[in-house]
Amino acid sequence: MKTIFMTTNAFEFGTLSATGTAATYDVNNILDRRPFTKWRAAADGTNYINIDHGGPNYNTSGIAIFGHNFYTVNATVTIEYYHDPPGEWVEAHSFTITKDGAIAGNWTAITDGDQWRIKIVTTGGLIPEFAVAILSENTVFPVPPDSPHADFIERGIKESGNSKTGNLLGVVNRGKANEFNLKFTLLTRTWVDAYIRDWWWPAFGKTGLPFTYVPDYNYDPEEVYLVRCSDDYTYQTPKSIGTYYDSIEFSLVGLRY
């Protein structure tokens, strides 16, 4: 089991461009972490979404793409980085896509890519699109969450009521939301302090900034959520066992795409 948080987005640092873009589907839409604004290609063929960091290299070890139609358009999708020297594009990851929605990729950290791109190939007039891309240095938890826990919890967001005589009235469905309650025990203090306390918590946990949660990448890389901490979440790490924290818990809310 491989549980992953993806946080900082390398696509936000540098010059973002696309090979071709349909009218009103600006490539910068992929940065806003919103599922209802998208980039769409202007035509089929080979399309690239490219980020040029302008010199500095960014450590990356994974990506999440939300709101895509890659299965419907039979797209071949790979992630590449520019390696200089010798000055060539190198494949970091290729996807096996079995449905539309969301997908995650994870690879051994690459530290020498000053440009990255998503390569999308379609034919037959089929046009690819997606809503959000997060190119990240993944936080991979070294142990699985404690059992029992539910990877998938979903509730409807709705309004309903009853008449004065108790009859059921209409229901207004507003959407859906997913909730996750995770607990990890006996993580080393060194790991938690470096990846959670000093990085994730100040940048994403307490600010409410959305980030990517992959419950079990090894089992299903297409079960991917865009989440934030619940409003009443309190970060704490009780400790009593040497170099380990007794436990750390997360309360997350978000949406599956």
Image (spheres, rainbow, N blue to C red):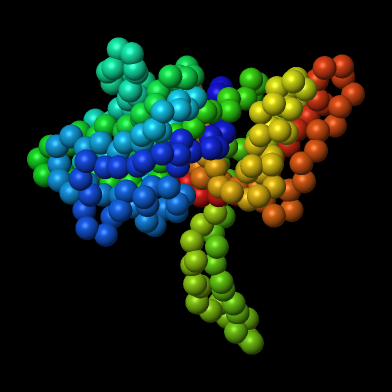
The vertical placement of 152 against 161, above or below, is above
* Position in image of residue 115 (x %, y %): 36, 29
- Asked whether 236 or 101 is in front, the reply is 236
Q: Quadrant of residue 20?
A: top left
- Asked whether 76 or 108 is in front, the reply is 108
* Position in image of residue 69 (x %, y %): 29, 44
* Position in image of residue 121 (x %, y %): 20, 33
Residue 226 in the figure: left or right of residue 54: right
Q: Is residue 221 visible?
A: no
The vertical placement of 43 against 170, above or below, is above
* Position in image of residue 8 (x %, y %): 53, 37
Residue 125 in the figure: left or right of residue 240: left
The residue lying furthest to the left in this view is 124
Residue 257 in the figure: left or right of residue 73: right
Q: Is residue 27 visible?
A: yes
The vertical placement of 116 against 108, above or below, is below
Q: Quadrant of residue 166?
A: bottom right
